[in-house]
Amino acid sequence: MGNTSSMLTQYDIEEVQSHCHELFEQQEILSLYQRFCQLDRNAKGFISADEFLSVPEFAMNPLSQRLLKMVDGLNFKDFVAFLSAFSAKASLRQKVQLIFKVYDSDCNGKVSFKDIMEVLRDLSGSFMSDEQREEVLSQVLKESGYTSDSFLTVEDFVKIFGSCKPEMDVEIPVD
């Protein structure tokens, strides 16, 4: 399914749709497959971190190093599953689960104050001092009913993000 010389069968498309909870139409999956094959320059059936970095928007993202840990070595089916969080049809939970994974860099199922500070540092760079970041984060946590000693779970993220509905929809161009 990841080789550029192969084509997707109807069965492959339906399998990918099922794996991704029917969030993409058949034409979108075909377009994503074309893009996957372009990125998979060596036709290995998976995309490496270097191949992901060839996408300028990805390389410029301040969270690209965190995202690379999540996407390095994805086959086509998992590539589409990763992108499904960006579908307009994705549920709040699906979107928040991806956001949670970005923050949970050690994959222990919990996000600490330190984890969030690292993401804030990546996002704000030199525009904010660590003291400013700590102050802002402490205030946001306090308003949400947490402290700097709290460990947040994905359920906590759903509760926090549920009120703001994260906008992360990306339209898949269909040829």
Image (spheres, rainbow, N blue to C red):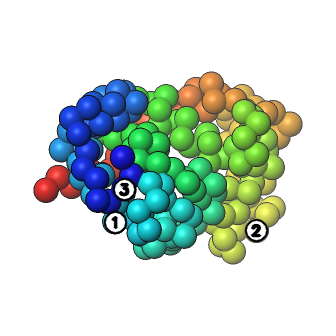
Return the residue nearer the eye: 5 or 175: 5
Secondary structure, mark 1, is: helix
Rendered position, 122 above or below 18: below
Q: Is residue 16 left or right of residue 108?
A: left
Count of numbered circles on the image: 3
Amino acid on which the number 1 mark rests in the picture: Gln
Residue 62 tag number:
none
Q: Which mark is residue 38?
A: 1
Task: Give residue 133's position: percent from left, percent from top.
Answer: 73, 58
Q: Give the residue displayed 67% in from the left and 56% down from the top.
A: 119
Labels 2 and 3: the sequence-earlier one: 3
What numbered label is drawn on residue 129?
2
Task: Report the side of 167 relative to 32 (left or right).
Answer: right
Q: Secondary structure at mark 3?
A: loop
Dot 2 amino acid type: Ser
Q: Is residue 106 visible?
A: yes
Q: Residue at x 34, y 41 (%)?
A: 87
Which residue is disc 3 drawn over? 3
Q: Is residue 149 left or right of 154 when viewed as pictured?
A: right
Label 3 sits on what residue type?
A: Asn
Foreground tag (2 vs 3): 3
Estimate the spatial distance between the alpha carbons at disc 2 and disc 1, rounded to whole Å.
40 Å
* Closer to the camera in the image, 175 or 11: 11
